[in-house]
Every structure is written in structure tokens, then in C-alpha cells.
Image (cartoon, rainbow, N blue to C red):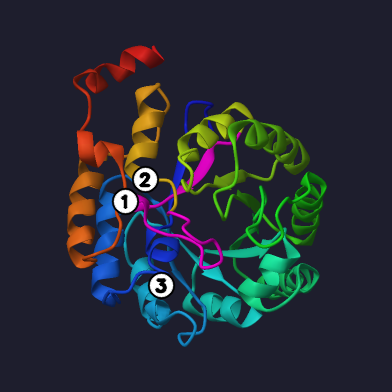
Amino acid sequence: MNERDVQIREVGLRDGLQMVRTILASGQKLEWCARMVDAGVIDIEVTSFVPPKVVPQFADAVEVATGALAIAGLRAAALVPNLKGAQRAFDVGLGKVHYVLSASNEHNLKNVRRSTAESVEDFERIAAARDELGRDVMLGAGVATAFGCTIAGKVDERTVLGLAETLIEAGAQEITIADTVGYANPAQVRALMRQVVALAGPVPVACHFHDTRGLGLANVMAALDAGVRAFDASLGGLGGCPFAPNATGNINTEDTVFMLEAQGLRTGIDIGKLLAIRETISAWLPGEPFTGAIARAGLPATFADREAIAA
């Protein structure tokens, strides 16, 4: 990947929808996916294979994942909470699954009712099941609460680095470091991500930031400085964490793309089309808090000159 190229991975359909009150129809979710691909967003986490009784929004996970596979140009992924969820995703035929555990053991116990060590063992079983499939499935692993936890407080960098190394050794083909509760600051991000990138070597590294305290985009810049070139983002900034009181959503896709493109980096994403999709989704989700400076203020007249910045 060229140094100027940055991958944006849309998580609005999964992280963004997991806490909203309105249950979208499968057809609406697939329309969202198709329009995002048309806008240039080709990496989308389309659903989560969690038990429907836990998150009713994803009761249609099989239907949505199956439909997503029929959308030309879409690299569809799904979150899996355990081996059973992974097997469901494998059965659908997805080419990528993503597993997350928490650096904070206390958060992991609250979130998935098992210790972090038990989640590592679960990931090892998922990796073994993937290896037995006889087809290529990319297995990504995320380390949540990497910059702090609302329950446990400070999280030691050594814990995060140790988990990243363990997950790679167990078969992770991509590592995502997540600021699940919005505690991170740019200095902290720069310091940790330099170490993660060095440790990961050829394994791709991504970041997942929340904008809880207004530092989301600043943290993206810090991660860029550290060598990260892939970021999760959510259309309209939808999303949150049930164990982070007052936490706002993920970094906003539109604002993130604007910030990157404005300084000459390349995402391949059409912001105008993103804003049009946002209007549709916000109408589908009345009462949900959509964020975003570009949606409010519009693109500056000088944005058309951004190619000159990169020249």
C-alpha cells in the first residue's frame, strides 16, 4: 500500500446499530451496504453473529451476510463473539471475520462473560476452525479497551502488546487496537501504536477510535504518525459502548474522510455520496444522535484544490 493510501472500514452497520432503538429491515441494511460501495467504501463490517436475544438488531445476521456477498466490489466482514458465532459466519461463506477481546479483564467479563485469558483460548479455537475450512478466510483480531477502561481504569501498555503478540501467534492476520470507551489521547496513541506496528511486522494494523471527548480525529492523526493506515469509522458517528456511560459514538466516517483527503491522503471515497447516504439513514433512525462537522458546515470551497497539496 502506498504511504498516501488510507483504508476506511465502515462499522456503522455493526457497531453503529448495536445500540440503536430502531430495528432496520435486512433490505435497508443491504441498501446501506450497496450505496456505501458506490461511494467508494468497500470494506464494511456488515453484521454481528451474536445471539439475537442479546442484540435483536442482528437477528438477521445470516440474511444480511448472505445478501452482502452478492454486492459487487464489497469486502464484507462480520464480528463474531465466540466459536459458535464464527462457525455461523464461516457457513455463510464470508471471506473475513473479526474477533474482539478486551485488554481489561473486568471489561471482558462484563462484555462476554469470560476472562480475557478464556477469550484468547476461544480465539485459538476459532483460528483452528478457520484452518480446517479449506478456503481462504481472513481472521482479524481486535484488542478493546487498549487505552483505558471505565471499569478498571488504566490499562498497561504491556498488556496490550502481549495480547497483540499472542493473537498474531495464534493466527490473527490483522490486528485492530481499539479505544472502546474514548479515553485515548494523541500522545498515548502515538506511543502505543508505534510499538504495535513494530511488533506486528508484516501483519496489518488498524485503529478503532471513539470521539467521546472530542479527540477522535486527533487520535487518527497520531496513529498515522505511528504508521497506521487503516481505521474504523461509522457513518454519522453512530455507535457506542454499553459499559461506557455517556460515551458518544465512533469517529464519523464523513469527517474522517474529509480530514484525510484534505491533506492529500487517498481514501477513494466520495464525501458527497456519503452525505446523501447519511440523510437516508438518519431518516430511518429517528431520534438517534448523528454527529459530524461536514454534515453541518459542508465542504470548504478550497477542498477542490486538495490535489495540489499532494503534488
User: Up-down: is 300 above or below 41?
Assistant: above
CA separation in Å, label 2 and label 1? 7 Å
Secondary element type, mark 2 = helix
Frontmost of labels 2 and 3 is 2
Seen at 18% across and 53% down, the residue is 279
**Prevalent SS, magenta region:** loop
Spatial CA distance of label 3 from label 1 is 22 Å
Which residue matches tag 1?
Answer: 236
Name the image quarter holding the C terminus: top left
- Give the secondary structure at mark 1: helix
Q: Nearer the viewer, mark 3 or mark 1?
A: 1
Other residues around mark 2 within 10 Å, as few (<14) / some (14–19) / many (≥20):
many
Report if residue 268 is visible in the image.
no
Q: Residue at horizontal 44%, vertical 44%?
A: 8
Which residue occupies 65% across, 55% down? 145
259 to the left or right of 90: left
**Residue for badge 3:** 65
244 part of magenta stretch: yes
- Residue 152 point in image, percent of width and height: 72, 60
Task: Find out whether the residues at labels 2 and 1 contact each other: C-beta distance under 8 Å.
Answer: yes
Q: Nearer the viewer, residue 87 or 235?
A: 235
Q: Which residues are magenta?
A: 228-248
Residue 30 magenta-drawn? no
Q: Can the viewer see residue 12 in this picture?
A: yes
Amino acid type shown at disc 3: Ala
198 sits left or right of 264 in the view: right
